[in-house]
């Protein structure tokens, strides 16, 4: 065994920067195109159901009547088909992953109901009245 070669490696490792990161103090920086999890901008969703029909893992549920969009996070395989097929471009892939959990769960998003149309204001009394 070459002792000098071993010592050289030891010394090199002693004085070089560590190969690991001090996680969680220094969080991981994901590459730009990482497919972590699906996010929805629910206010722009029209509940067409295309994302649900395209999903190969059957992880998306769309309820047009209730105005809800749901995803089973641990069923999703991050293929991004739903993002590519959304006609309103309201789905996107975010870089962070779903946190581990002991049970499967479904995340449901609800669109805010549209504000009721404003009634035209009644003209103040006396206006448009002829003397
Ligand atoms: S495809 Fe887009 S607009 Fe249609 S239901 Fe899915 S998220 Fe909503
Ligand atoms: S990324 Fe793929 S698996 Fe996940 S919800 Fe979208 S279509 Fe389904």
Image (cartoon, rainbow, N blue to C red):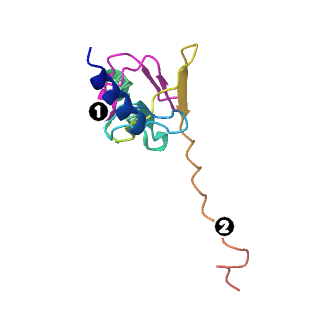
Which residue is at the far right? Answer: 125
Give how far across and how far down residue 14 sits, in percent. 42, 34
- Give the number of the disc on residue 85: 1
Which residue is at the far bottom? Answer: 131
Circles 1 and 2 in contact, beta carbons < 8 Å: no
Q: Nearer the viewer, mark 1 or mark 2?
A: 1
Q: Earlier in the sequence, mark 1 or mark 2?
A: 1
Give how far across and how far down residue 116 sits, in percent. 59, 49
- Image quadrant holding the N terminus, namely top left
- Which residue is pictured at 55% across the width and 18% down the height? 105
Q: Is residue 22 above or below residue 54?
A: below
Q: Is residue 37 left or right of residue 32?
A: right
Q: Secondary structure at mark 1?
A: helix
Residue ID for mark 2: 122
Mark 1 C-beta to ligand 1 under 8 Å: yes
The image quadrant where one finds ligand 1 is top left
Q: Is residue 90 above or below residue 64?
A: below
Q: Nearer the viewer, residue 62 or 81?
A: 81
Give the CA separation, mark 1 to mark 2: 46 Å
Give how far across and how far down residue 4 sits, in percent. 29, 25
Q: Is residue 54 left or right of residue 106?
A: left
- The answer to whether residue 9 is seen in the rendering is yes
Query: Which stretch did the figure color magenta?
Result: 55-84
- Which residue is pictured at 70% across the width and 74% down the height? 124
The picture quadrant where one finds residue 119 is bottom right
Q: Nearer the viewer, residue 51 or 100?
A: 100
| Residue 7 part of the magenta segment | no
């Amino acid at each position: 065994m070459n002792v000098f070669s071993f010592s050289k490696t030891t010394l090199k490792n002693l004085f070089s920067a560590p190969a690991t990161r001090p996680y969680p103090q220094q969080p991981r920086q994901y590459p730009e195109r990482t497919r972590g999890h699906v996010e929805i901008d629910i206010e722009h969703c029209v509940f067409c159901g295309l994302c649900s029909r395209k999903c190969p893992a059957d992880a998306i549920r769309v309820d047009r009547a209730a105005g809800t969009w749901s995803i089973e996070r641990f069923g999703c395989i991050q293929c991004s088909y739903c993002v590519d097929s959304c006609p309103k471009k309201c789905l996107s892939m975010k870089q962070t992953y779903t946190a581990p959990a002991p049970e499967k769960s479904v995340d449901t998003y609800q669109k805010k109901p549209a504000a009721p149309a404003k009634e035209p204001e009644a003209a103040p009394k006396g206006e448009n009245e002829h003397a």
